[in-house]
Image: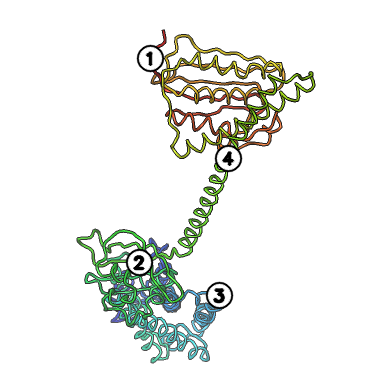
Amino acid sequence: MTDVTHPQTIGLGIAAVTSQALTVYAWRRRDTLAGQALAAMMAGSALAALAHALSSVGVPPAMRVLLAKLAFCGCEVSSGAFLVFAIAFAGRRSLLRRPSILALLGVHAISIPLALLLGWSRLTTGDVAAVAADPVALPAGWRPAHGTATLASTLVASGLFAVMAIQVPAHYRSRVRWMAVAALLPLAASMAYAAHAGHEPAIRLIPAGHAASGLLMVLAFHGLGLLDALPLARDLVFMRMPDPVLVMDRRDRIADMNHGAEALLGVPVRRAVGLRAADVASRFPELAALLASPRAGAGELAVSEPDGARHFAAKVSSVGADEREATGTVVLLHDITDRKEAELALRAAHEELQALEQMRDDLTHMIVHDLRTPLTSVASGLRTLRTVARLDSQEQALLDTAIEGGDTLLSMINDLLDISKMEAGALQLRLQEVAPEELIRQACQQVELLARQKGQTLVAEPESGLPSVYADPDLARRTLVNLLGNAVKFTPSGGAVTVTASVAEGEAVVFRVSDTGIGIPEDARERIFDKFGQIESRKTGGRSSTGLGLTLCRLAVEAHGGRIWVDSEPGAGSTFSFTLGGGVQSG
């Protein structure tokens, strides 16, 4: 057989080099959408073009057969990869599952081993004419199926690009149009191959067609980066977003919108494109106002619908490097209706709770205020009785118990009334210069008897030379008495209670009341200062408590501009500290 250089050799060589370069380019970007498919398409095209080019420059018959078979396999890989590329790029990834792939690429997959394995025996028979006419040597019955499958796969791929070119928004159309033109080149080559029954001269067109197609595809999307798959992203991400999204051009006309926006506005995208966004949204005044002159930023708006209002968090972003160079605007409407309804329900519940608390406070204040006068009369009468009556020891003990209970109840009522005044800001402080040592001495006198009855040690250790503090003497003393009373109450018999005072920053004086009692759990150290706030472990430590004493202490200290806190370790005692503002150095 005489080897003659084929006239397509130069073109095939160029196609081989181009395809190889595009293979490298695509493989380096294989993580992009459809990047691997394009790399496989270009690799197959490079193999086919190179094999055809080499077979045209004079090679032995055996090498010619091998090159022809390699070229055929390259074309099969290129055709199949072209179909996969088109499916992936067009967003039809459901077709890329195993059953669909076998149906789409089954003929190509079978043709490759048939081409590689069959036809070698003709080299030993010397049938040079048969080898030259058909070096690939596919079975005669397989040729129609193979030709039809090759044409069909290329036709489907080209059709997908054509559909995309029609359906995508105008600002995508120029790029996809070039993709559609590029897709026609493999189709033309496949039609020529099918028309010539798959003979070698026609098959040479396929790698050239795929090489030119790949080059056009890369150039079409070079401005956005290889396979920056806008149509695919639109289908898989943009269109399937549940939140409405609108894309507008510089004149605030709709360029695109997703299904969520279609459902909200009641207009399909094919009718809305090109119309002013404000006109399309005219039945929603707030939304229309936003779309009439969108500015980058974020906010909230409500849209009234027949079944109720929908609330959206609106985010407006410019398309471009900055607003001056923006080519359009994107408006994202995130539905926050559920959150708004929950907020409204929470606000209503909070208002109802506040109303109930106010009702409780009003009722408590009324009851307490009405109880104070008769209780004062009862306590006064019992004291008078103790003075004038001749009672034996048992009767005297009962009377003392009654007087003590009356005093405790009257103290609780006074605490409640004072707490109410302080919460309302109606309590007038009688500020004057007070010596910290005197406050401590008076407070200790009031709890000394109780501490002695429990066998406790009561220690007062104020620093020497403390500055005076400006305070309401009665309120400051009651604060110390409450803290000392709690310390004695919740400290076991034989324990110790210590009260100290020292100078802090800014000449404020810090009073500390420490005990060796049962301590306070960490999660309760804030709650105990709330009204009626008690903890179970402290309830069991001594006599019952109303939970008002520490509330009075907190409000009294805060009324003086100070603060109160507690340090405690369960089982190792507690230390309550509070500050009062500094004054003149005592002499």
Q: CA distance from mark 4 to mark 1?
A: 42 Å
Q: Residue at x 55, y 43 (%)?
A: 366
User: Which residue has dot 4 on it?
Assistant: 370
* Nearer to the camera, 58 or 574: 574
Of labels 1 and 3, the one closer to you:
1
Q: What is the quadrant of residue 131 in the picture?
A: bottom left
Q: Looking at numbered disc 1 in the image, what kind of residue is underneath it?
A: Val
Give the mark nearest the N terminus, 1 or 3: 3
Q: Looking at numbered disc 2 in the image, what kind of residue is underneath it?
A: Asp
* Nearer to the camera, 467 or 304: 467
Q: What is the quadrant of residue 533 in the picture?
A: top right
Q: Is residue 353 above or below residue 186?
A: above
Q: CA distance from mark 2 to mark 1?
A: 77 Å
Q: CA distance from mark 2 to mark 4?
A: 80 Å
Q: Looking at numbered disc 4 in the image, what kind of residue is underneath it?
A: Asp
x and y percent of residue 287 in the render?
33, 69
* Nearer to the camera, 196 or 239: 239
Of labels 2 and 4, the one closer to you:
4
Element class at badge 2: loop
